[in-house]
Image: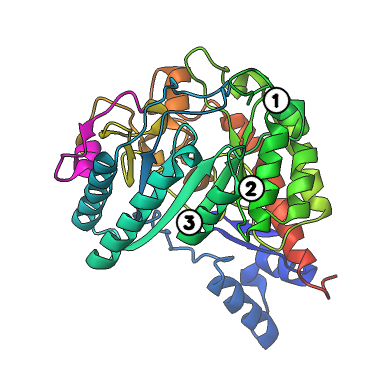
């Protein structure tokens, strides 16, 4: 399996091609097959010209808006960063948030808008979600901006009525699920302190029965990492996409996983072994290692400060949902994204080339230096590499190897 970071290309080759890639200048000029193989490898990005310097990844074409539909939730997750209440977003504030998003999209030349309806538990206010998404779709059509939506849920509130509404809206569904037993329950208990995994899994299965294929968002902590193999095995059975995300440190919440590096690395590898035994047909390059994405180069870890808006239920606008209580502007701003980009006080999501310890790293455009909030809470600086850097580097090759095995599994005549 070969990988060229500058082009994010992964391929499985035979031994003859591997030898050719090791010494392309030694290929006999009189052998057309060798020259054709070299030309194909160059076209795929597996060979790079000596004088070529690949350009850094370009700017995003999608503006993403986090719309905080409600502050109410029936769970009390240990790593949640919100103070819960019964407050919800009004119709007027929601429409103002949608309008503000499209103003920034037009001003910034974005081709697409994606709305993430979140909370709290957004499904508890599905009527508001439906109203705002229909309004957003109409505004997008009017302005010529492609529009999509996604609702984030803990799975326990996905009743048949709510699922029917989600299916009718045509929006995507993401469900948070951290395990199949106490690994989930110990960090995602209900308001009363009981477990939630049974009702969450029931919601996932009910969604599948309605023709909805939810993406499962898995938060990895030192307490839950040993439960990953069982959970991933179940998700592969259901043929559901999933993402593995490292827990973010919160005030009074779990500490950085960097304090449990060896435990996290070992637990992640156990989960990878489950995937290796039955690789899916789709790529997992962007799903298996937190914010890293070995399939697409990026200069910023996420869209914070670049192509991302966070609207709280009162109409305030923040840079990141983890810092939703630290707004920078409001829905009344003519171009809230411009205000976000100009702000120098709040969280700074610096380009990876400006981070100490990242500038010369060959993986920099696939990791981008890690979550800015997590880095600042660990180092009191934004211009340094992630506290999880050693974990990422330990697992990059495991993720790439899985992709190679997946490609081989899709080739019935591969040797």
Residue under label 3: 171
The residue at 73%/52% (across/down) is 401
**CB contact under 8 Å: marks 1 and 2:** no
Q: Indicate which disc, 3 or 1, sits on the residue closer to the N terminus.
A: 3
The residue range painted magenta reads 324-341
Left or right: residue 77 versus residue 343 is: right
Residue at disc 3, secondary structure: loop
The percent position of residue 196, horizontal first and vertical second, equals 67, 30
Residue at disc 2, secondary structure: strand
Query: Dot 3 surroundings within 10 Å: few (below 14), some, or many (20 or more)?
Result: some
Q: Is residue 33 above or below residue 294?
A: below
Whether residue 243 is visible here, answered yes or no, is: yes
Left or right: residue 236 versus residue 83 is: right
Whether residue 61 is visible here, answered yes or no, is: no
Q: Rounded to the nearest whole Å, what is the CA distance between mark 3 and mark 1?
A: 28 Å
Instruction: Place residue 11 in its image quadrant.
Output: bottom right
Query: Dot 1 surroundings within 10 Å: few (below 14), some, or many (20 or more)?
Result: some
Badge nearest the viewer, 1 or 2: 1
Q: Rounded to the nearest whole Å, what is the CA distance between mark 2 and mark 3?
A: 17 Å
The residue at 38%/41% (across/down) is 66
Residue under label 1: 195
**CB contact under 8 Å: marks 3 and 1:** no
The percent position of residue 129, horizontal first and vertical second, equals 40, 47
Residue under label 2: 242
- Looking at this rendering, what residue extends furthest in the left direction? 334
In this view, the residue in front, 137 or 275, is 137
Left or right: residue 353 versus residue 191 is: left
Is residue 327 shown in magenta? yes
């Amino acid at each position: 399996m070969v990988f060229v970071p500058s082009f994010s290309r992964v391929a499985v080759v035979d031994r003859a091609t591997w030898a050719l890639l090791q010494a392309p200048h030694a290929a006999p000029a009189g052998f057309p097959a060798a020259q054709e193989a070299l030309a194909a490898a160059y076209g795929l990005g597996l060979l790079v010209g000596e004088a070529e310097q690949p350009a850094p990844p370009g700017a995003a074409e999608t503006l993403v808006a986090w719309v905080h539909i409600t502050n109410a939730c029936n769970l009390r997750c240990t790593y949640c960063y919100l103070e819960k209440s019964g407050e919800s977003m009004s119709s007027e504030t929601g429409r103002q948030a949608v309008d503000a998003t499209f103003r920034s999209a037009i001003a910034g030349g974005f081709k697409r808008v994606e709305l993430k309806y979140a909370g709290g538990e957004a499904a508890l206010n599905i009527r508001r979600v439906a109203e705002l998404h229909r309004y957003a779709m109409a505004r997008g059509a009017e302005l010529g901006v492609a529009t999509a939506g996604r609702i984030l849920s803990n799975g326990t509130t996905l009743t048949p009525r709510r699922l029917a509404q989600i299916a009718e809206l045509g929006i995507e569904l993401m469900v948070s699920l951290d395990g199949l037993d106490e690994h989930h329950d110990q960090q995602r208990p209900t308001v009363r302190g009981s477990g939630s995994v049974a009702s969450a899994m029931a919601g996932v299965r009910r969604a599948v029965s309605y023709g909805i294929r939810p993406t499962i968002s898995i938060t990895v902590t030192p307490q839950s990492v040993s439960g990953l193999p069982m959970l991933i095995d179940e998700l592969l059975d259901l043929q559901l996409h999933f993402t593995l995300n490292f827990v973010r440190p919160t005030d009074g919440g779990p500490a950085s996983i960097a304090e449990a590096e060896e435990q996290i690395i070992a637990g992640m590898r156990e989960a990878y072994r489950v995937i290796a035994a039955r690789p899916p047909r789709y790529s997992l390059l962007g799903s298996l290692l937190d914010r890293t994405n070995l399939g697409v180069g990026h200069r910023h870890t996420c869209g914070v400060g670049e192509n991302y808006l966070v609207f709280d239920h009162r109409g305030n606008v923040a840079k990141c949902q983890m810092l939703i209580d630290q707004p920078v502007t409001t829905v009344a701003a003519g171009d809230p994204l411009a205000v976000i980009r100009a702000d120098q006080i709040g969280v700074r999501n610096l380009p990876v080339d400006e981070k100490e310890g990242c500038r010369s790293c060959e993986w920099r455009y696939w990791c981008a230096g890690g979550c800015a909030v997590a880095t600042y809470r660990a180092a009191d600086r934004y211009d340094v590499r992630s506290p999880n850097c050693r974990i990422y580097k330990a697992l990059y090759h495991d993720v790439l190897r899985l992709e190679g095995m997946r490609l081989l599994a899709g080739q019935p005549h591969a040797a």
